[in-house]
Amino acid sequence: MKSLLSALCILFFSTLCYATSPFSLESLERVNITVLNKNKHLSESFVKGLEEEVKTQLNHAGIQTTSKSFSNFLIKINTQEHKGVRFTHVNLSLVENARIPRKKPTSTIAITYTKDDFFETTDFEVDVKESLLFLVSEFIDQFKEENK
């Protein structure tokens, strides 16, 4: 019994080591990109440029960036200042229609992927772009791994 429990623990922890996130991107084909710019520090043209760069990377990875279904690739950028220091939060989420198996099956909207970056920034546009591209690259790496 003790050896069975040990084997199960080893299996569980080794599985965690290889998981890139608790979310699945298997069979994802298309998304709509939405950028929520929640601060005054980024120009509209800069945000549009970020959106175009993300579209290009997703298309290159094989993910179409127009969808008739509710499948939204949300990018949220928010900044707060505290005692003269600027902190930035960049969030990347995938929000999709989902069917929840309950006593009476329910259709709803669910966050099916999310990843965040929170950092102190000095060169705002450079730092935001670097953070976003890092999060997108992690998303694409996981997508490719799960859709070989």
Image (tube, rainbow, N blue to C red):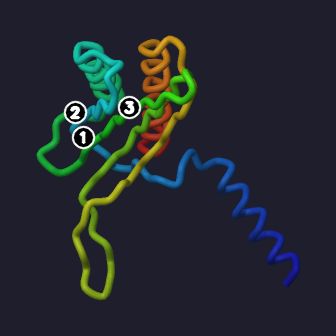
Are circles 3 and 1 on residues that touch, CB within 8 Å?
Answer: no
Q: Quadrant of the C terminus?
A: top left
Left or right for 6, reference 41: right
The residue tagged 3 is 77
The spot of residue 78 in percent (x, y) is 40, 33
Which residue is located at x 22 percent, y 70 percent? 107
Q: How dense is the environment of label 3, judged by Cα within 10 Å: few (below 14), some, or many (20 and up)?
A: many
Which residue is located at x 38 percent, y 54 percent? 112
The residue tagged 1 is 31
The residue tagged 2 is 65
Vertical side of 71 occupied by 74: above or below:
above
SS for callout 1: loop
Amino acid marked by disc 1:
Val
Vertical side of 111 occupied by 31: above or below:
above
In front: label 3 or label 2: 3
Which residue is located at x 30 percent, y 88 percent? 103
In front: label 3 or label 1: 3
SS for callout 3: strand
Q: How dense is the environment of label 2, judged by Cα within 10 Å: few (below 14), some, or many (20 and up)?
A: some
The spot of residue 109 in percent (x, y) is 26, 60
